[in-house]
Image: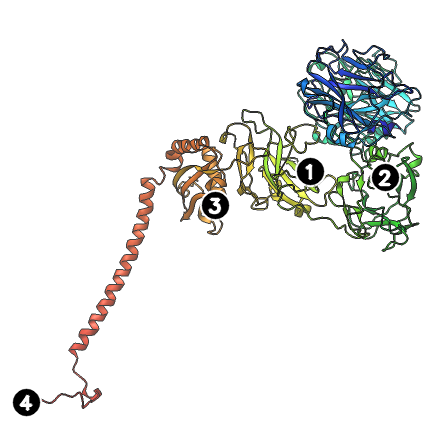
Amino acid sequence: MAAFLVGFVALLQIVPVISESCLIISEVNADNPKLDTTEFVELYHTSGKAASLDGYTLVFYNGNGNVAYKVLNLSGHTTDARGFFLVGSAEVQPKPAIILPPNTVQNGPDAIVLYQGNTERYSEKMNITTVGLMDAIVYSTRQSMDAEFMADILTPGSPAFIEDDSVHKSDESMERCWLSSGSWTFQVGLPSPGQHNQCHSSNGTAVQISELRLGEGQTEGFVELSISKPADPLVLVLLDGRTATVTFSMDINAPKEGLLLITSKGSGLKGDLMFSSGNLSILKPQGASSGALAVYAGRTTDFTIGSAVSPLEPLDSFVYAGPDATPSANLTETLIPGRDAFQLSSSVELGGITLSRCGTASWSRDPGVFIKTVQTPGKANHCLWPESCPKKSVIPEGTAAPPPWDPASQQDFLLNEVNADIPGAEEDAEFIEIWHPTGRRMSLDGIWLLLFNGHNSKPYREISLTGYFTDTRGYFLVGSDGLVPKPSIQLPPNTIQNGPDAVALYRSTRGPPSTLSPGIPAEGLLDAVVYRRPGSDKEARDLSDALTPGQLPLLEDPTFHVEDESLSRCNSRRPFDLLSFVVTSPTPLQKNVCPDPPVGVVINEISSTEWSNHSQQQNFVELHAPPMTKLQGLVLVVFEEGHGGETLAVPLTGSADQDGYYLIGNGTNADQAWPLRRNGAAVPGCGAVALCYGSLRYSRVCQPETNSSIIDAVAFTKDQKLLSILAASSGWQVMPTLRSAEGPLSLSRCSCCEARTPLVWTTSIQTPHLSNLCPSSNFSSSVALCLGPPGSDGEQHSLNCSGWRTDNSSRREVEVAMYLENWCHCGISALHLREVNISCVEGWLSVQGSIRALSARQRELIQQASREYRSQALGEGCSNHTVHKSVGERSALGWQIGLVVGTLLLLGLGAALFAYFYKKRQPRDYFSMELNENEEEPDQL
C-alpha cells in the first residue's frame, strides 16, 4: 500500500524556480463517512507566513461534463500566520475562512484548481481552462468514472489521484507531501486541516542516512543512520569530492532496527558507535571543498584509504558542494546518478549545520531529500516543509530500487518482446522473449521471471530460469506449448494474462524474489513491462508506480494487425523504459521488426548559456522535420569537450509541430524539457550534439561502433576524438562567434537537408520555432583579394592553396572562411561565401565577389575589418605591387612564348623561299619530261 500511495503523483507544472515560495493546494477531504459535513480544501503558502490571496481563484470542476460547478474568488483574504488557508464545511476545526454548505465538494471524478489572474475570467459552468493555472489536483475513487481527460489537461503526465476510503477506518484526506527537491506528491492520510500534513515515507532501502552534522570543529560532527531491517555488515565511507578518493572508512554492525548514531569523541552526545581514528575532514567542509558520505554492504578492507570511489552501488549516499567547489563528475555519477549535490552556503565556515532527511521519497542516494534543521540525534527528525514549489517532473526511480549494476559487463538481461493476447480463444501462442545485449549464449542462473496480476499487484507465476541458457544470439523464449518455434520453457495455453498486468525480470541468488520483500519486489529488479488491454488504462497503477514509475502502461493494440501483434523493444536498450517498445508483428527468437527511423529530421538550431553575448541565453536544441513527424525512437545526445563520452541522452517523445519544429529546452515554448542535471549547462560551450536512432547501449550511444545510428551531428569543438566520431566530412567544426550578432546567439542551420556537415551552419540570433536568420545577399559587401603565398622568410602570409584539388570547392570555402574569420572575428562561415569566386594559381589565392551577411551590422563589421587590416595583412586588395608582380610574370612568360613562335615562323618562311629560288636557277631535265603533243607549241623561226 505504501508503494501505491507514493506512486500516485500529481506533480504540477507551474513554478520552475524551486527557491521561490508559492501558494499550493495542500490537502483535500472530499468524501467523509456518512454525511459529508467535514469537507475541506486547505491551501498553504510555502513561505510559512501570512500571504495575500488577492488575484487568486479556486475552481471546482465536475468530471461529468468537465465544467466548473463552484468558483471562489479569494481576493481580500490572506493565509494565517503559518501560511494556511481553509475552505470547507462549518463543522471543520479550525473554522474555515470560507464556509461551504455540506456536501459541496464532490467525491470524484473531479478536480480542484487554483488560478491566479483576472478573477472575472472564471465563472460557474465554464469549461476546463489552463489560463492562469497555478496548482491542481485531479482525483477519483475506485468506483467512480474516468478522470483522465481532466488529468491530461490539468496535470499532464500525472494520472488522477484515487482517494481510497479503505485506508483508514474513520476518515481520510488527500494530503500533499514533499518528496525531494521540487518534487511533490499526494498521499492518503488522516485529515489535518490547518496543520502540517503527517506525511510518511514508504520503506526504502534497508539502510538510509537519516541525519548528519557538518562543520564546527573536530568533535561536533555526527552521522545518524536509519535501519529498517537488520542488515549485513556495513561500512561507512567518507570521500573527498574533488579527487573522488576515500579519506575514511569504518565497519558498522547494525543488529537491530531503528536509528543508529555515530558520534565524535568529546561531542557530548551519547551514541551507539564512535568514529574511529582517521581523517574526518569531510565532516568539516570549507567553502572551497566538497565531499561525500556513503554506506555500503561490506568491510573496510574493500574501501582502503586513498582508493578511488568504488564502482559498487552504495545502499545510500550523500554528496555536498561548498559555495566555491564542485564535486568531480565521477563521484556524482557513481554515488548520486542523475541528481545534484547538496549546495552548502558560505555560513558553513562560520558554524555547523545539521541536515535531516525530510523528503518522503522512498528512494535513496538523493541529497535533495535533505534540508537544514535543528539537530535531533537519536530521535525522529524535526521536519518542516521547505520553501519549495511543485514542478512538473517524473519521480526518479519511484518505489523500486535501482537495478543491480555489473561493473564488468555493464549489461544485463532485458525483456525484448511480449505477446500476451493472440486472436481466438485458445491463446496457445503467447510468449515472453528475454534477450541479453551481448547477443551471445549466456547462462540464466539466478534469473527469475515474474508475471503480475494487475488487480491485486501480486505475482501469479514465478519462474526460475536457473539451468537454462540463451541461444547463440542472446534470445530465450518462455511461452505456450503451441508456439512455433518451441519455447525453452513451455506454459499451458492462456497462462499469460491479457492485462492490465505486468512482466518483470529479476536477478536473485537467495531464492524467489517474492519471498525477499513484501508487496511488489524491488530487490534485484532488472527490467519490467506493464501492459494493458483497451479500456483498462485506470488499472494496474500499483504495478506501474513500483515497476515503471512515471509511465503509463503499454497498450497491446489488437487492431494493429489483422492476425496478431506483440510489444517489441525497438527504440533503446534502457531497462524500465516503456518508450522503448512499439506494437509490431510477433518475431519469437528473431530480430524484432521495428519501424524505420523518421525521415527528414535534422538538427536545426543550437544554443548554450555559455555563449553569453551580454544577454540572457537559453539552453536549447531545435529539430526540424516534415510537419507532424513522430520522433519516437530518436535520442538527442549531448557531448562535452574533454569528457570522453556523452554527458546527456534524451529520448524524444513527441512530434514536430505543423511547421516542422521541435524544441528541447526548459523555456516556456519548449516541446520537451531537459532532464534534471547534476551541474552545468545542458548544452556545453564546447562539445557536440548528435541525433541518433536505433539500438542504444545503456549508457553509451553514438559511439564509433554504433556510428550508423547517427542521423545528424554538429560538433562545436576542436576535440579530435569527437570530430572523428561525429563529423561525416573532413572533421571540420563549427564554432560560435559572439560579435557577429546582437542579443542571444545560436548556431543556426541554413540548409534543409544536408546532415553532418559544417557547411550549412553559421552563428545567428536565436529563433526558436521560427525560420533561422541566415546570410543574405541583401547585406552583401564586395571583396577583391589577392593573397600571396608564403614569403621568402618562410612566414605564412595567407593560406597555402597549392595543394588544393580543383574539384573540392567545399574545402576551399571552409578554409577561406576560417582564414577570414581569424582575420576579422565578424562571424564569417562558409555560408557567407556562396557568391565569392575562389581560385588558386601558383600559390596565389584570389578571392573575388560578394560576402553575404546576416544583417547590416555584420556587414559593417566585415567592411570595418577590411579597411583596418587590408594594408597590414592582405595588401590593398590586389595592390599595385601584387598586380604588377603577377602581371609582369605573366607578361614575361607571354613574350617568351611569342619570341619562340615568331622565330619558328621566320625559319619556316626562309626555308620556303630558299626552295623556290633554288629551283629557278636549275636547267630543265628533258629526259624526265612527259611529252604532250596537244600542248606542245610550234617552233618559231
Classify residue 127 by image quadrant: top right
Residue under circle 4? Answer: 941
The residue tagged with tag 3: helix, strand or loop?
A: helix
- Viewer-proximal residue among 648 and 133: 133
* Above or below, 440 relative to 513: below
Q: Is residue 773 left or right of residue 274?
A: left
Q: Are marks 1 and 2 in contact (CB under 8 Å)?
A: no
- Crowding around mark 1 (Cα neighbors within 10 Å: few <14, some 14 to 19, many 20+) is some
Mark with earlier residue (3, 4): 3
User: In this figure, which colouring scheme has been used for the structure?
Assistant: rainbow
Question: Which numbered circle lies on residue 654?
Answer: 1
Residue 903 in the image, given as x and y percentages of width and height: 25, 61
Question: Which numbered disc, 1 or 4, marks the residue that appears first in the sequence?
Answer: 1
N-terminal label among 3 and 1: 1
Label 3 – label 4 distance at C-alpha: 90 Å
Label 2 vs label 3, nearer the camera: 2
Q: Nearer the viewer, mark 1 or mark 4?
A: 1
Secondary structure under badge 4?
A: loop
Residue at image position (84%, 10%) is 94
* Residue 320 seen by the camera: no
Amino acid type indicated by mark 1:
Gly
Q: Position of residue 897 (x, y in %)?
A: 30, 57
- Sequence-wise, the earlier of marks 2 and 3 is 2
Q: Are marks 4 and 2 in contact (CB under 8 Å)?
A: no
Q: Earlier in the sequence, mark 1 or mark 2?
A: 2
